[in-house]
Image (tube, rainbow, N blue to C red):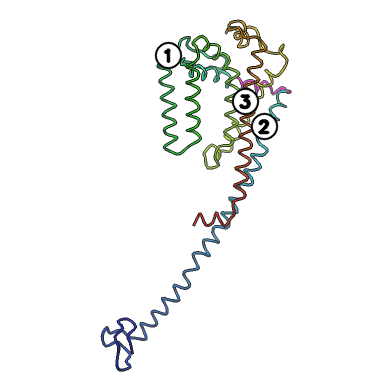
């Protein structure tokens, strides 16, 4: 008989190995028990993994379908409701929101042209001359923000930082006498751009804190839609409704400054604001289509594929 452990060949049939000393019956019983345990243990993790992944995969698909509905309805409804609000007494509320982004537009335009600026509720104070220290501070802040976004692989923010640098370079390349007119135009013009950015935050990545914060996500969309529509309705309406004249205790209104001090005609003024509004609408339309396509693709990912990638 040959020993199953050390392979020593016994000339006589014995119950234990004469070389290594094992008991044949006990050794074979231990081997059979180990084989049975291995056969049972192998499929268990697979079954458990599949059982655990099914609810999670189902939840992911439900979330993707819900996100697809949100992206299909949220932006059009927000703009439609905001347009209807302009016909009611709540237009005053929209005007207050538009005023905040209006003054922010003045301030940001001034910063990009190299001037200090402090926005308040009804007026934005800014410097008359370009300051290279302001240019250096703003450029450093943009570059630092873009670097941090690159290190953390936030490619959307990297693109935003690059776009801001290009806009700043363009503004700085303009003649100095155009800066003041650009800052004035940046009130309602900046309001439309900033309102568009506020609405665009609705399409932040699903894993981002902005998207997960329910109130912030929908609140920014509503504020952006109301502010944008308030400015757009103003400049797409009759010319006689435009706020020409003087603001008591402040100065001439923005349209009056642009026409009386900087020589813009009323037609040029309206045309430039409406052109900017069309650019914003096109950007929102492109973002809307991208949001729908990306959300739809997430709903089409096979559940089995998700399970395999997770395990």
Q: CA distance from mark 3 to mark 2?
A: 18 Å
Q: Earlier in the sequence, mark 3 or mark 2?
A: 2
Q: Residue furthest left?
A: 19
Q: Is residue 311 left or right of residue 1?
A: right
> Which of the 4 image quadrants contains residue 235?
top right
Q: Which residue is mark 1?
A: 131
Q: Which residue is mark 3?
A: 279
Let me know if residue 242 is in the magenta part: no
Q: Earlier in the sequence, mark 1 or mark 2?
A: 2
Q: Is residue 297 left or right of residue 129?
A: right
Q: Nearer the viewer, residue 304 or 100?
A: 304
Q: Is residue 81 left or right of residue 165?
A: right
| 36 is higher (above) or lower (below) than 48 | below
Residue range (magenta): 87-99
Q: Is residue 276 left or right of residue 37?
A: right
Q: Which residue is mark 2?
A: 78
Let me know if residue 90 is in the magenta part: yes
| Label 3 SS | helix
Image coordinates of residue 10 in percent, x first then y, are 30, 90
| Label 2 SS | helix
| 48 is higher (above) or lower (below) than 122 | below
């Amino acid at each position: 008989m040959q020993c199953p452990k050390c392979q020593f060949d016994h000339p006589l049939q014995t119950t234990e190995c004469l070389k290594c000393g094992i008991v044949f019956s006990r050794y074979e019983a231990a081997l059979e028990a180990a084989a049975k345990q291995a056969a049972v243990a192998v499929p268990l993790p697979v079954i458990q993994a599949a059982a655990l992944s099914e609810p999670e995969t189902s939840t992911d698909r439900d979330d993707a379908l819900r996100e697809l509905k949100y992206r299909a309805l949220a932006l059009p409804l927000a703009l439609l409701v905001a347009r209807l609000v302009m016909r009611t007494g709540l237009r005053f509320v929209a005007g207050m929101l538009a005023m905040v982004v209006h003054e922010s537009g003045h301030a940001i335009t001034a910063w990009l042209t190299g001037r200090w600026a402090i926005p308040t509720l009804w007026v934005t104070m800014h410097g008359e001359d370009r300051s290279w220290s302001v240019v250096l501070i703003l450029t450093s802040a943009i570059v630092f923000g873009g670097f941090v976004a690159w290190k953390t692989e936030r490619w959307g923010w990297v693109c935003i930082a690059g776009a801001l640098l290009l806009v700043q370079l363009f503004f700085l390349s303009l003649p100095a006498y155009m800066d003041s007119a650009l800052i004035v135009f940046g009130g309602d013009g900046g309001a439309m751009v900033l309102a568009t950015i506020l609405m665009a935050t609705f399409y932040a990545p699903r894993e981002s804190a902005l998207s997960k914060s329910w109130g912030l996500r929908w609140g920014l969309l509503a504020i952006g839609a109301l502010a944008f529509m308030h400015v757009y309705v103003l400049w797409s309406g009759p010319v006689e409704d435009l706020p020409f004249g003087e603001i008591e205790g402040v100065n001439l209104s923005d349209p009056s400054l642009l026409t009386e001090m900087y020589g813009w005609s009323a037609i040029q003024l309206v045309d430039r604001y409406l052109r900017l509004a069309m650019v914003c609408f096109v950007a929102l339309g492109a973002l809307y289509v991208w949001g729908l396509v990306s959300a739809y693709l997430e709903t089409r990912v096979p559940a089995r594929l998700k399970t395999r990638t997770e395990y």
